[in-house]
Amino acid sequence: MKKLALVFTMMMLLCGAALSAAADDSAKAEALVKKGVAYLKSAGEEKAFEEFSNKKGQFVDGELYLFMVDFNGLTIAHGGNNALVGQDMKVLKDADGKFFIQEMIDLAKTKGSGWTEYKYRNPKTNEVQPKRSYVERVGDAFIGCGIYKR
């Protein structure tokens, strides 16, 4: 019985640690977006777009990076994959057929900021996983940062 209680306690601690890490990642993603919004306002578009797409820049933190998409679905900056800059992302669907970029655009237009959920291929595991992205409106575009759910 003591072993079972110990195993249960260990499982609860691990689950708590995983939830805490996920919450921490959410806070980091949101903070990174807010930092990007402030940088865009202070440094100007050209400098900000370049810095957002710099894989070794200040807007890449481990697995976290910024992306920026205008309300037509055109990628303006992308810290995870520069090949996406200039691409129309509005037509992208997730694994369940959800137009997730359009959902981000709608969220930014209507609420100004918030979280969206979708399924996306994780480049580390090469598996489709649940993902959340925080987006915040800047003019006729949004800046976002996504995290994979653990």
Image (tube, rainbow, N blue to C red):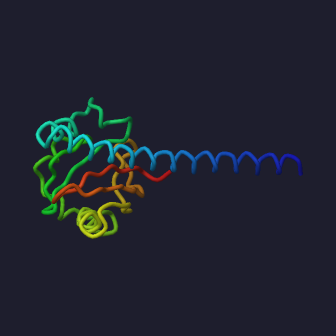
> Which residue is at the far front?
42
Q: Residue at x 25, y 33 (%)?
A: 55
Q: Nearer the viewer, residue 139 or 81?
A: 139
Total marks drawn?
0
Q: Nearer the viewer, residue 139 or 143?
A: 139
In the image, is residue 124 above or below residue 71?
A: above
- Residue 142 position within the rendered picture, expressed as x and y whole percent measured from the top left: 23, 56
Report the side of 20 relative to 118 (left or right). right
Q: Nearer the viewer, residue 62 or 96?
A: 62
Rendered image quadrant of residue 95: bottom left
Q: Residue at x 50, y 51 (%)?
A: 150
Report the side of 10 relative to 147 (left or right). right
Q: Residue at x 24, y 40 (%)?
A: 39
> Which residue is at the far right?
1
- Residue 131 position within the rendered picture, expressed as x and y whole percent measured from the top left: 39, 56
- Residue 46 position within the rendered picture, expressed as x and y whole percent measured from the top left: 11, 40
> Which residue is at the far top?
56
- Residue 122 position within the rendered picture, expressed as x and y whole percent measured from the top left: 36, 48
Rendered image quadrant of residue 70: bottom left
Report the side of 71 relative to 10 (left or right). left
